[in-house]
Image: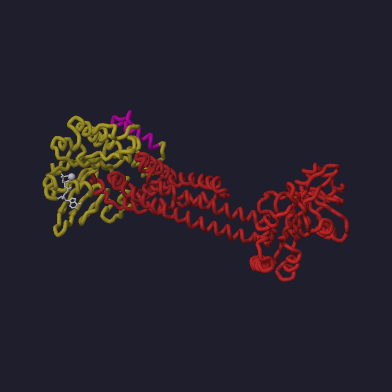
Amino acid sequence: MTLQATNKGAAIELREVRKTYIMGSQEVHALAGVTMTFGIGEYWAIMGASGSGKSTMLNLLGCLDRPTSGNYRLYREDVGSLDDNRLSDLRLRYLGFVFQSFNLIPQLTVRENIELPLFYLGWDALHSAERAAELAEQVGLGDRLGHRPAELSGGQQQRVAVARALANDPKIILADEPTGNLDSSTSAQIMDLLQTLNEQGKTIVMVTHESDIAARAGRRLHMRDGLIDRME
Amino acid sequence: MIVARTILNIRLGLKTLMLHKLRSMLTMLGVVFGVGSVVAMLAVGEGASMQALEQIRSLGSHNIIIDSIKPIDDEQSGDSGARMSVYGITYNDQMRIAESFGDVRRIVPVKVLRQEGRLAGRALDLRVVGTTHEWFELVQRPLLAGRVLVGEDLHRGGNPVVLTEFGARRLLAASNVIGQSLRIGAYVYEVVGIVESEEGVAGGQTPDQQIDAYIPIQVARQRYGDISVRRQAGSQEIEQVDLHQLIVEVDELEHVERTAAGIAAMFERFHGRPDYAIRVPLALLRQAEATKRTFNIVLGSIAGISLLVGGIGIMNIMLASVTERTREIGVRRAIGAKRRQITGQFLIETMVLSGLGGAVGIGFGVSIPALITMIADMPTVITGWSIFLSVGISLSVGIVFGLYPAVRAANLDPIVALRHE
Ligand SMILES: Nc1ncnc2c1ncn2[C@@H]1O[C@H](COP(=O)(O)OP(=O)(O)OP(=O)(O)O)[C@@H](O)[C@H]1O
Ligand SMILES: [Mg+2]
């Protein structure tokens, strides 16, 4: 397997990363030794059958989990040795998440949802509100700042989620089936959004089942049984 | 920054609680009753001890007060027009107390007379007290004009009278009355001073109603004797009472109750019937403390149980809330919230809940004593520190019972939380 070396350097480096779940007497190798580099500014789609380890991989990349063994470097920092607080900090400063089911907080307004990362970054109310308005504008929801998630369509909710993922100006955006709950036209809107972000220099790693969605990404990674099957 | 974040957390807490208004209100009930009981309890206890202290201050903590009381069986004795009843404290009692108790510093006798008084042509039925100058030392009555009785009055042979403010008003006398002659019964006195009247009549030193004037007791005995005659609708009522009251001052506070017991035993032996009553102001304090204790136990139990039940209710609701909002917790963690920030968020939410309950409880706790005062005529005092304490208690309930759900929320695995339906 060849390491992907781009002229811009590596955002994420995985070396022999394994994730093993123990279910009773049985060991499930969700990741069975993955070595892989995601370069800065690249746009990857991860594909593969159900249960092949895509989400497990994304959770690891997102510092939501630690590998059972192997080595994971995020911008040269060895993630495996960090405690929960430092992992939280990495997520807060480097990463933005977009989920299949949007995961907006229902009792908060659009503005407050977008402000959430800024809240944990310790921004003051005034600047947070400004930034949230800016981001809402950017995803085409500048007029919905006071709405609650329940008052928005799925596509709109996902755009809010993208805006929230962008609030902390992350280096990497991680998306697990971001269009999984959307129809094709709203999916296209989200994909346009992600493409724009990639063009602006964000590294994007996206899990998807659909090949036409995957086709929008610059690179594709196929997984099978916790291993990398092939890359294109 | 932390302050701003806390304010945001409080606002978020309020928002979440407003989402389930009824549920939140029901959850608060336990804390409401608990805190209400605490405030009420302290108000009643405080009122009782304040009343007791007030009485002790006016009656004197070192004093034992003995009153003459007309026994009930005397009322129906004799079927003819004239009735004669002999009762109450005797001069012998006074002597015996003075001789028997080493702890007694002084004894002040009080003799009450009803005589016609005349001042500048105005005639009135007066209530006159015969006593010694020491009465004015034991019983603090601010002087309004002139002087009170002094030791020399006994020997000088002059016939001084001290008016009370009340008496002076009834006689329409101004302060220039000093030096004028007041006729009491058949005898003439010189007005030497005016003192303030006793405030609350109930439980005061002087028996019955307001007193108009004070004269030296020797003069009273010599001039009017110990027998009084009262004419009532055709019949005559004749009474012989030596003294109407004795104020016994004890040297040390620790000796008061011992001496009071001794005096009670002595009266029991020599009187053989209840024609006297002994009051010990110091005992009022004990009584107030007992009342306070009873209230503390009753309301304290209610408060304790309510707070416990309320706390468990809050914990229950918060656990449900954590479960309901598992996804939210997962999202916050994915975004970068640290464990302690999640703990803080839920803890603050619980404290908002219990704090609101506490606020409503304080409202209740302030109105219950008002009701008690109105219905049971018991004094109550709401002190600032009892409010402080209640705020402290309600927030503590929030912390104690909110900590477990909050920690549980913070310890959720973010991946599992995000997958939660
Ligand atoms: N918490 C867990 N405990 C035990 N096994 C797990 C756990 N999470 C994942 N697995 C197992 O790891 C393997 C990979 O799961 P993963 O969720 O990564 O698959 P996926 O590729 O995302 O599938 P899908 O396309 O259905 O989302 C599966 O066999 C799954 O059962
Ligand atoms: Mg998956």
In the displayed structure, B119 sits above or below A156; it is: below
**Residue B344: x %, y % from top left:** 38, 49
Magenta part, dominant SS: helix
Residue at screen point 61% across, 53% down: B51
Indicate whether B120 appears above or below B142.
above
Return the residue nearer the eye: A219 or B12. Answer: B12
Quadrant in the picture for the N terminus of chain B: top left
Q: Of all residues shown, which one is farthest toward the front?
A: B80
Q: Specify the segment rendered in magenta.
A: A127-144
The answer to whether B405 is drawn above or below residue B23 in the figure is: below
Q: Residue B305's x, y, as percent?
A: 41, 54
Tell whether position B308 is magenta.
Answer: no
Q: Is residue A135 magenta?
A: yes
Q: How does the figure colour the protein chain or chains?
A: by chain
| Left or right, B352 with reference to A195 | right
The residue sitting at the top extreme is A143
Q: Nearer the viewer, residue B87 or B27?
A: B87
Q: Report the chain shown in yellow.
A: A
- The residue lying at 25 percent from left, 32 percent from top is A153
Please tell me the colour of chain B.
red
Q: Nearer the viewer, residue B263 or A146?
A: B263
Answer yes or no: is residue B78 visible.
yes
Quadrant holding the C terminus of chain B: top left
